[in-house]
Amino acid sequence: MILHTIVPLEQVFSQPAPEYRYRQMNNSYIEERREGDGYVISRVLSTNPRMYLNPNYQPGAVMKTPER
């Protein structure tokens, strides 16, 4: 089924949009999605191929928020 509408997706689908943020790490950017008490990596934005091979920065990895 195809839905053709001018209504924003937030009104059509009752789920709120996830909270995203970008974090700079090692001269690259990581897009993170808020989940619980931490953030889950959703994508890596980098020109360095090693960032994509690092298991700490793979999509789905959980990054805890630092204690302040």
Image: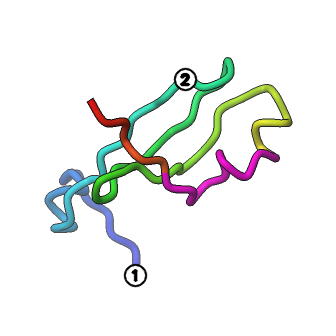
Residue at image point 36% right, 51% down: 38
Q: Residue at x 59, y 28 (%)?
A: 29
Going by the numbered disc 2, the residue's amino acid type is Gln
Contact between labelled residues 2 and 1, with CB atoms less than 8 Å apart:
no
Task: Name the residue tied to disc 1.
Answer: 1
Q: Earlier in the sequence, mark 1 or mark 2?
A: 1
Whether 56 is among the magenta residues is yes
| Residue 21 forms part of the magenta stretch | no
The residue sitting at the top extreme is: 27
Q: Residue furthest right?
A: 49
Percent x, y of residue 51: 76, 37
Residue 58: x and y, percent? Answer: 67, 52
Magenta region: which residues?
53-62
> Image point 16% across, 67% down: which residue?
14
Q: What residue type is labelled 1?
A: Met
Mark in the foreground, 1 or 2: 2
Say which residue label 2 marks.
24
Alpha-carbon distance for marks 1 and 2?
Answer: 40 Å
- Quadrant of the rendering where the N terminus is positioned: bottom left
Q: In which quarter of the image is residue 2?
A: bottom left
Q: Mark on residue 17?
A: none
Q: Where is residue 3 in the image (x, y as percent from the top left)?
A: 33, 69
Q: Give the image quarter of residue 46.
A: top right
